[in-house]
Image: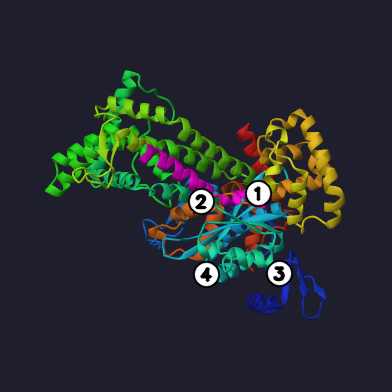
Amino acid sequence: MDLVLLIHMLVNMIVPTIELDNNMWHSKIKGIPVQLVNVLDRGTKKSEEEYRARLVIILGVIRFLLLQALAFCGHDESLSSMNKGNFLEMMSWYREKDSNAKTLLDSAGRNHLMTSHGIQLQLCQACAEETTKVIIDDIGDRNFSLLIDESRDASIKEQMAMVLRYVHKHGYAIERFIGIKHVGDTRATSLKASLDGVFLKHGLSMSKLRGQGYDGASNMRGQFLGLQRLILDENPYAFYIHCFAHQLQLVVVDVAKCCSSVLDFFNHITLIVNTVNASCKGHDELAQEQHDNIVNQLESGEVFSGRGKNQATNLVRPGDTRWGTHHKTLCRFIEMWTSFLHVLENSHDDAENLTQRTTAGGLISQMESFEFVFMLHVIITLLGKTNEFSQCLQRKDQNIVLAVSLIGITLRQLQNIRDNGWDQLLKDTTDFCVKHNIILPNMDDTIPARGHSRGRGGQMLTFYQRFRYEIFNVLLDQIIIELNNRFAERSTQLLRCIACLDPRSSFANFDEDKLIQLAQMYADDFSIYEISFVLRNQLENFIADVRADPSFVSCNDLGSLAVKMVQTDRHIVLPLVYRLIELALILPVATASVERAFSAISIIKTELRNKMGDDWLNYSMVCNIEREIFAKVDDDAIIYRFQDYRFRKGTLPRRSSVGSSSTVDQVMEDTDEANN
């Protein structure tokens, strides 16, 4: 026994100066390989297989917790605790349900349970790093763009989320979350330093960056000192695109404050929502009243049943930073109109003081006025167009050509409403008022202009003039002006050139000269020889080929064009044209993927888990957000990465070729099958 201890001590003295390569030890000092086979008999095949099997069980529990965004640790993990936390409780449950697992786990001994917090963190790290490795390997040496946003977490830490957008080898535009980074401050220089650290960690090159997508914060988009300028100074081909969805929300916010009538309307909407939701009783009454109304409508045949229809809903206040909330709230007013009035009547009758009774009564009078109903219908009509545009922008596979086209479509629809939509809008408002017994005004009667007194001989106008010219026309003009101002970059040279690749109407916008200018903007991706002598010939061959091929008729956007070119191998025959298409697809449209990452933060790092470390948060978010890839990463890849972090008591069998390079391909194939 003393001899064994002596040998063990000698081996521990040797370990710091040598490295292990399976069962071969190489001396770093003398440079002479020294083979030490089965040191202390730790490497028996049976013990290796048992060790791996225990790791697979533990990893299975960790996979489940990561995918479901559940906490690992418990408040009390002592042996006498009745609730040791999700991880240990699931391990105990596993033992009870599987006798073989119990035997296997118990055979490890108390000093080799592999259930400590450190082991859990390292396995989570291995899961996240293998998931990220799949993404980085799929990008390879392709160009990509970067989407970044910052937000506070539950512990009031500023977190920077990063998403990469690139074109997959099958032609699909993909956006992948690569991590979240805690930043001490939000100055552009600090963000750039954190970004450089992430790029260095993952082996990404700033020279491959071809696009930047941020919101409108000055530290991000600043032309002189913002993050986009710091990146452009290093790489002039990383063109910046202001998030289209964010700009569209700014349009909605500005329209909601464009005139006093609209501002008053939204103030009343907010007050009604607050009054109805002020108490649990009011909230429950609203839900019950809506339920009874739906039942009555189903019995009378006004509405029909079906999966996903007639669901219970609640109210949220319109938020300036929450995309689509203005439109959603107003639509629920239409759906729950009688329910609102019923709850307000109850609030009036049950009010505890005069202020509450007066407020509820005033809101009922306001809701049952023609002007309120008219404002409700006209704003729903306008925001319905912008909300549809916003939903399209938030798709992960959205591309800049289609986004610019949607802006033009939305503007034309709004202009058509201004020119031809008044009669239909007035009819819809009148029908609603008749249905709900709301008094209709005579459009020829006169009223004082807003802000003027009738008694002092102020300016007078008819109801028609007020609703048509002071509200309807003003709203339409304002939203059209705001869209043109906010999306002024669609007229930039870059986007004008990219628009020439639009495949609709048999490539009606195709222009060889502008596409050559586009190649010149990306001088790092095209040589002078390719631009001067090769590209024009390929463009001529491309346009003649695709216009003659009926299979390209179905291509209605840039994304489907890229996929079709890969499917028909034209990306090999016409590589320069396909390179232009790739560069156009890479440009970011909206930061919706980054916003979804912040939604995941609120699920993973809650108020009860606000002490979660930055590493835990990053690993959990990578695995949870990129769950499709993480679920397909091989167990062996994770286990061997975990094993390589440090020298461990247990050993694994000789490592076979563990690859996960086809993981993204599997995910894309599954997506295609689901779509089909």
N-terminal of the pair, mark 3 or mark 2, is 3
Q: Nearer the viewer, residue 51 or 665?
A: 665
- Is 363 magenta? The answer is no
Q: CA distance from mark 1 to mark 4?
A: 29 Å
Colouring: rainbow
Range drawn in magenta:
469-494
Q: CA distance from mark 1 to mark 3?
A: 65 Å
Please give left or right for residue 373 compared with residue 503 in the image. Answer: left
Q: Is residue 293 visible?
A: yes
Question: Which class describes the residues within 10 Å of circle 1: few (<14), some (14-19), or many (20+)?
Answer: some
| Label 3 with label 4: CB-CB less than 8 Å | no
Q: Nearer the viewer, residue 421 or 660?
A: 421
User: Which residue corresponds to mark 4?
Assistant: 187
Question: Which class describes the residues within 10 Å of circle 4: few (<14), some (14-19), or many (20+)?
Answer: some
| Quarter occupied by the N terminus | bottom right
> Where is residue 623 drawn, in percent x and y?
56, 53
Question: Tag 1, which secondary structure?
Answer: helix
User: Which residue corresponds to mark 2?
Assistant: 247
Vertically, is 162 above or below 391?
below
Q: Nearer the viewer, residue 581 or 407?
A: 407
- Report the amino acid beneath label 1: Leu
- Report the amino acid beneath label 2: Gln
Q: CA distance from mark 3 to mark 2?
A: 65 Å
Question: Farthest left residue?
Answer: 353
User: Which residue corresponds to mark 1?
Assistant: 495
